[in-house]
Image (spheres, rainbow, N blue to C red):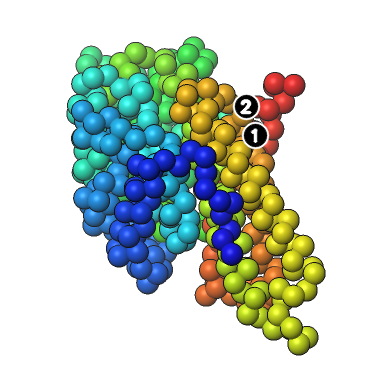
Amino acid sequence: MSAHSGPSPYTQEDVDLFREGLSKFLDAECPPEKIEAWSRNKIVEREMWTKGAEFGLLGLSVPEEYGGMGADFRHERVVIEEFGARGMEGWGVPLHNMIVAPYLIAFGTEEQKQKWLPGVVSGEIVLAIAMTEPGTGSDLQGIRTRARLEGDEWVLNGQKTFISNGQTADLILVVCRTSDNGSRGISLIAVEGDRAGFVRGRNLDKMGRAAQDTSELFFEDVRVPASNLVGGIEGKGFGQLMQMLPQERLGIAAMGLAILERALKLTVDYTRERQAFGKTLMEFQNTQFTLADIKAKAVIARSFIDSCTEKLIRGELDAATASIAKLWITETELEGVNKCLQLFGGYGYMNEYPIAQLYKDARIDTIHGGTSEVMKMLIARTL
C-alpha cells in the first residue's frame, strides 16, 4: 500500500527523471545512520551541501545563465517529498532553494545575480532569510532591525531569532527598516556571513527537526555595500515579501503532506504486523476507519497542492489560496500524525520509533511561515 495518492497530473518526464536520480543520490549519500547523526549534532555538515551541489540539488530554479537548471516548483516538490520520505526535514535545502533563492532570482539586480547565484548553485553560498525578531513573530511590519545609509554603505543594527540555516548560511537576506514610512520603509539587505559586527548566536535547542541549524543573529553596526540592497531600490522589501510568501506557504504545505504520508505508511506497516487480542491491529475496524480517514485527507491535500502548483507556475497563485493550503494541510498533518502515533501505543512514545520523531517534526508547520491564526486572518479578509 502506498501512502501517495497516485501520479500527479503535473509530473512530466523531466520531473520523473529528476526524482529517480535524486532518490538514488539520497539512498547512497544519506543512509539512516547519517540522518541520525545530523540530529545528534544539530547540524548537517558542510560536505553534504557540496555533494548536493555536485549532484545538481542546489539552486534548482536558478536560470541556466547563472549555472542553475531553470527548474520550477514541481522540482522543488520532488525534493520536499524525497526528503520527507526519509525523515530529512532537517537539511535546509528547501529553504535555500525554494524560499530564499527566488528573492534573488525575481528581484536581484543583474549585478547581484551574477555575484551570488552561481555560488548558490555550486554550494559556495548557503542562503538564509532573517525575518523573525524576538518581539515580532509574524508581524513583519513591526520589525525593529534598522539600516541607515552612510555614504556608499548600509549600516545594520538589530537582532533576529529562529533563523533556519543560521549557523551555516554565507548570505543572509535581512528584513530591516530603512525608514519610518510604514510598510514602505522595509527593505531586504543581503549580509555576508563574514561581515564585521555580525554575530551568530547559539544553535537553538528545538523540540523537533534537530538537524536543522536554527539560530539567533545579531547585527551591531554591520556595514555592507549599498549595492547589497536587494533590487537596488529602498523600501521595496515588504512588497517583495508579499510576492514570495505564497510560494513559501505552499512549500510548507507540501512539507506537511510529506510528513503525513510518511506517518501513514509507517502506521499501515506497523498495524499489519502488530498483534493484539489474537489478530493484527489492521483487522480492527477502528484502525481501518482511522487510517482510511487519514488516507482520504492526504489524497485531497495532494490534489489541492497539485492545483496550487499549476497556479503558481502560471503566476496565478494568490495569497489567500496559499494561506488556505498552508492552514488546512498543516492542521490536517498534525491531526493525522497524532492519530498515527496513537495506533503505535506505547511504542509511539519512544524516540527510537520514527513516528515519535515525525510527531515532533510536524509541530512547527502550523507556526513557521505564518501561524494558522495569521492564515485565518488573511483568508478572512477575502470574505
Instruction: Assign a secondary structure to mark 1.
Output: helix
Instruction: Assign a secondary structure to mark 2.
Output: helix
* x and y percentages locating residue 187 in the rendered image: 40, 21
Q: Is residue 303 left or right of residue 22?
A: right
Q: Residues within 10 Å of mark 1 (few under 14, many from 20)?
A: many
Given residues 185 and 111, the one toward you in this image is 111
Position above or below: 169 against 100: below
* x and y percentages locating residue 240 in the rendered image: 44, 22
Given residues 61 and 196, the one toward you in this image is 61
Position above or below: 10 against 45: above
* x and y percentages locating residue 136 in the rendered image: 55, 34
* Residue placed under numbered mark 2 in the picture: 320
Q: Is residue 294 left or right of residue 162?
A: right
Question: Any mark on residue 324, and which?
Answer: 1
Q: Which residue lies at the image location 80% right of the left edge and 69% below the top edge?
A: 285
Residue, far bottom: 278
Disc 2 marks which amino acid?
Ala
Q: CA distance from mark 2 to mark 1?
A: 6 Å
Position above or below: 166 against 319: below
Answer with the quarter of the image where residue 28 lies.
Answer: bottom left
Given residues 134 and 28, the one toward you in this image is 28
Disc 1 marks which amino acid?
Ile
Q: Which residue lies at the image location 47% right of the left edge and 18% below the top edge?
A: 239
Q: Which residue lies at the image location 57% right of the left edge and 24% below the top edge?
A: 318
* x and y percentages locating residue 190 in the rendered image: 31, 29
**CB within 8 Å, label 2 to label 1:** yes
